[in-house]
């Protein structure tokens, strides 16, 4: 850590994404003189190797930070993100709490970094993991040909539900392989050796899950185009980590698969793997632990001359959450938006 760097708070530091954020701040050399982990009362006092003692959230402990990266759920973000902002920190929030607030920019580092200039509440929102990886792939296509309509099917890993989802998949798999009855608690039905067309939660009166609504609303906000028509179905699959998506993209002007491949190959944060005859295409097991978005199976929709089909895969804990949050903090630093906390709070 740099003596001349920033004081950084990581809220939700003991969770899956929080742990990756701590790792990435070190790996990427973020200019921090101090990184302080925060978590719930039950985790306060826990020693995190290489970081320090986990702090509770109080009005006293949150003072004097330059940036606070949140991965602690909407209720915690709703209460504590404004308090950190009032104390002078710029907040990067991973929850869904602030994403659709018109005074809070919703930012993907490779897609709309200039939206950071719209920060008015001292909070920047990180999109949903499925939205995140998709818009990285869509951005160069939208810039080149415009997007008229998207039809999306996601295949979402259980790590998107947290450690409890991973534990349930592994536990159920072990039980079934040993002739035992699996326990079901995290999901509505057994997830092992199954696929649930039910990623997220259904609100009363809505036949879409909140994951599907996030894909629709967040994509429009990030791409700055509310006219894009979007249909989404989100599926939970028995994969530990790494979300996959089948995306049908109808463009406003013609875009050939060859040109799309060229655009995606040149796009920041994208790796194209597209030789299906040789068995080369993106897979969750290969995206695991990596920061890029992987795109393949780029082909013409035979039923629509202005539509392409894509297969998009990324590590939902890294690019889908932690990596982009750290990249936002890096952008805030590069743009001179992280000043002295005390001066901003004054």
Image (cartoon, rainbow, N blue to C red):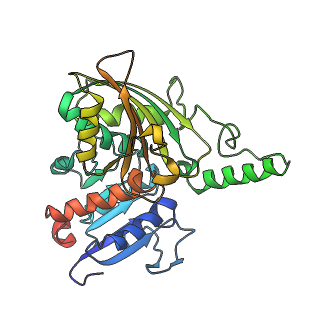
Residue 63 seen anywhere in this rendered image of the structure: no
Horizontal arrangement in the rendering, residue 322 relative to residue 192 (left or right): left
Q: Residue at x 28, y 52 (%)?
A: 124
Name above or below for residue 268 compared with residue 254. below
In the rendered image, residue 243, in percent from the top left (x then y), is placed at 48, 45
Quadrant holding the C terminus: bottom left
- 264 and 162: which one is in front? 264
Horizontal arrangement in the rendering, residue 154 relative to residue 227 (left or right): right
Q: Residue at x 52, y 23 (%)?
A: 207
Quadrant holding the N terminus: bottom left
Quarter of the figure with residue 8: bottom left
- 311 and 54: which one is in front? 311
Residue 93 seen anywhere in this rendered image of the structure: yes
Horizontal arrangement in the rendering, residue 7 relative to residue 338 (left or right): right
Q: Residue at x 35, y 32 (%)?
A: 217
Name above or below for residue 35 compared with residue 184. below
Q: List the single residue furthest toward the bottom.
A: 3
Q: Residue at x 26, y 64 (%)?
A: 89
In the rendered image, residue 222, in percent from the top left (x then y), is placed at 27, 39
- 97 and 253: which one is in front? 253
In the rendered image, residue 255, in percent from the top left (x then y), is placed at 24, 26
Name above or below for residue 205 compared with residue 18. above
- 120 and 175: which one is in front? 175
Q: List the single residue furthest toward the front.
A: 278
Q: List the single residue furthest toward the right.
A: 179
Horizontal arrangement in the rendering, residue 54 relative to residue 193 (left or right): left
Quarter of the figure with residue 149: top left
Across the whole image, how many numbered discs are drawn on residues? 0
In the rendered image, residue 56, in percent from the top left (x then y), is placed at 47, 70
């Amino acid at each position: 850590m740099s003596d001349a760097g920033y004081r950084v708070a990581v809220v939700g530091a003991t969770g899956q994404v929080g742990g990756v954020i701590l790792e990435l701040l070190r790996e990427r050399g973020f200019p921090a003189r101090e990184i302080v982990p925060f978590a719930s009362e039950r985790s306060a006092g826990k020693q995190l190797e290489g970081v320090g003692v986990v702090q509770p959230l109080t009005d006293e402990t949150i003072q004097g930070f330059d940036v606070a990266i949140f991965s602690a759920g909407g209720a915690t973000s709703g209460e504590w993100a404004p308090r950190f902002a009032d104390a002078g920190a710029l907040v990067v929030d991973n929850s869904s709490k602030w994403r659709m607030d018109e005074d809070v920019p919703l930012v993907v580092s490779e897609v709309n970094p200039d939206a950071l200039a719209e920060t008015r509440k001292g909070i920047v929102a990180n999109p949903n993991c499925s939205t995140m990886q998709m818009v990285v792939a869509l951005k160069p296509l939208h810039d080149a040909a415009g997007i008229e309509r998207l039809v999306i099917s996601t295949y979402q890993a259980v790590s998107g539900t947290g450690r409890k989802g991973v534990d349930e998949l592994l536990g159920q798999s072990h039980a079934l392989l040993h002739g035992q009855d699996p326990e079901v608690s995290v999901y509505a039905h057994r997830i092992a050796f199954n696929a649930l067309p039910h990623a997220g939660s259904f609100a009363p009166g809505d036949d879409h899950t909140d994951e599907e609504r996030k894909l629709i609303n967040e994509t429009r906000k990030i791409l700055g185009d509310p006219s894009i028509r979007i249909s989404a179905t989100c599926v939970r699959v028995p994969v530990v980590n790494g979300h996959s998506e089948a995306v049908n993209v109808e463009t406003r002007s013609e875009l050939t698969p060859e040109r799309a491949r060229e655009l995606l190959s040149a796009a920041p944060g994208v790796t194209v793997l597209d030789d299906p005859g040789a068995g080369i295409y993106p897979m969750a097991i290969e995206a695991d632990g990596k920061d890029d978005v992987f795109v393949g199976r780029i082909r013409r929709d035979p039923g629509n001359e202005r539509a392409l089909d894509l297969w998009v895969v990324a590590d939902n804990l890294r690019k889908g959450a932690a990596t982009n949050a750290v990249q936002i903090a890096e952008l805030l630093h590069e743009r001179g938006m992280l000043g002295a906390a005390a001066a901003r709070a004054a």
